[in-house]
Image: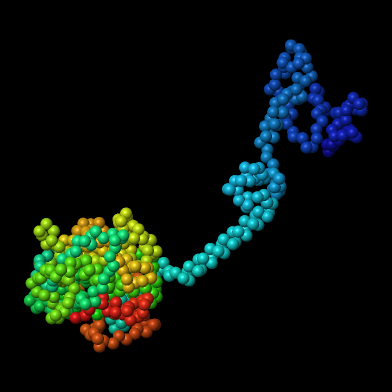
Amino acid sequence: MVGFELGAVPFNPDGWGPPDSAAEGLSVPNHPSNVPFAPFSRSEKLGRIADWTRNMNNSGRPGSKQGGYHNADSAFDFSGDDSFATLAADEDSSFRLVDTSAKSHHHNPNRPKFNPRWRFNPHNARSQLPQRRDEEQEAKKREAEKERARRDRLYNANRSQMPQRRESSVFKSSVDIQPEWNMLDQIPFSSFSKLSYSVPEPEDLLICGGLEFYDRSYDRITPKNCRPLERFKSRTFFKVTTTDDPVIRRLANEDKATVFATDSILSTLMCAPRSVYSWDIVVQRVGNKLFLDKRDRSQLDLLAVHETSQEPLPDLKDDINSMHSLSVEAAYINQNFSQQVLLRDGKKVAFEEPNPFANEGEEVASVAYRYRRWKMDNEMYLVSRCEVQSVVDINNQRSFLTLNALNEFDPKYSGVDWRQKLETQRGAVLATELKNNANKLAKWTTQALLAGADMMKLGYVSRVHPRDHFNHVILAVVGYKPKDFATQINLNTSNMWGIVKSIVDLCMKLKEGKYVLVKDPSKPQVRIYDVPQDAFDDDYVEEPLPEDEQVQPPAEEADGVAGNAATVDGATEDKDVANEVVAAT
């Protein structure tokens, strides 16, 4: 067995490394020649041991001889070479010490300097004074907690005081869906956008009533010289449905058409994709004829306000800015405006027959009924009763006008103050109304197109005070050509007639009976129900649907036209205003 012999290890009592052989008289075994020993410490870095790439005959060194040998020229000697020092310096420069300890505020670079310029600088608030780092962090946390608590209080207060957004609002159905009603079909509004149908120019079968001339001085009204809105309690306004019209009955007996309707019902169908609130139309199939009717106390007699707006209206019915109260107010304003802007000199244009709904000696509003007929196809004609409110002579030519009024109830809902913007930014006011009342403006334009009106006048009527819904002022009156305005609001007549043609074709396939078209209160679609013959009659009793069997959208009993609106001065005056809106024959 080969053994292993451990050589002698000299002991150095004076420090690290082997002892000095000269001083101690000892020799280090196996010590290479010409390799000097460099004392080192444990904290020092180790570099190169030998470098044979250097020029051993460095003539540039001081004291060196040409071709001579110098002890410092050894490959193991780096005492005269500064390359290692440079490398070490480079390594030291790339070394960074990460200090995780908290720095003292005495070394804060963001610490403000206290000099006279800093003292009078308004941007240096008291919060910028030097603080300890931990105190500063704690102060920031406390401020953040206070701000978060303040936002939570404001959010909860707004949720309790303000209604929900329009997206989450739940609207009520315009008519109760009874358990004995049978739903036949439901049509989404998305299918209406692809429809298109062209009809030829209509023909006038009969014109009834009388018209007064338009007062052109109202075209020069500005918010600075506005005029108060007057009340015309002595004049009677009629909202008669299709089957109650004696002229339509006569035309039906004479077999003048297959489908009969009014301009308000047709405009509701034509502008259905723009509607948000629920509505309903009664369809009666009698023989080979089709009658489109509205119910008594129907919402079609009122005018929707802010229907397409993103800002919700108050849900309380007693609020003067609720949906029902604003509808009654808008209908009241629209009726009175249509009579105030007329010349009261006694001149009147009479037509073939007088007003078919007026009694002898009764003062009626200025209105003319044009019974017009459209050819839907070779075997189908449609007759509609259309209304115009005034007439004007332009270049010795008589032109029909429709008169409607937009109403401002509170500028904070629309975000545009009419009194400030109508003169300078009338386009912005109209754009806001097109956004908030897209369906109402489209229906007015459709009615003007159906009636063949040459001009449609839009009045801007505002409350005297936002909390007073009885007194109003006329701020401006603007006229538009119906065809140009339809193009401006992107109203396609071919699409409108396509919707009517599809609904009529669907209803003509049904058997004889009574049906109702109901716009879903929460979805963009319309449903068709088969209802009993005595439905919506005065003696018809509607049985409530049990809660466990309710599968249709929630419904609420339709509000009457003569219902109570919001009160300011008292319920009696408000009931009178509602009763003025619609006069039954």
Residue 216 percent across, percent down from the top left: 19, 61
Image quadrant assignment for residue 249: bottom left
Image quadrant assignment for residue 291: bottom left
Identify which residue, 131 or 248, lies in the foreground.
Answer: 131
Residue 168 percent across, percent down from the top left: 41, 68
Residue 493 seen anywhere in this rendered image of the structure: no
Identify which residue, 505 or 242, lies in the foreground.
Answer: 242
Image label count: 0
The residue under the point 33% across, 57% down is 421
Identify which residue, 115 or 11, lies in the foreground.
Answer: 115
Residue 359 seen anywhere in this rendered image of the structure: yes
Identify which residue, 553 or 341, lies in the foreground.
Answer: 341
Residue 81 percent across, percent down from the top left: 73, 23
409 to the left or right of 346: right
The residue under the point 28% across, 67% down is 228
Quarter in which the N terminus is drawn: top right
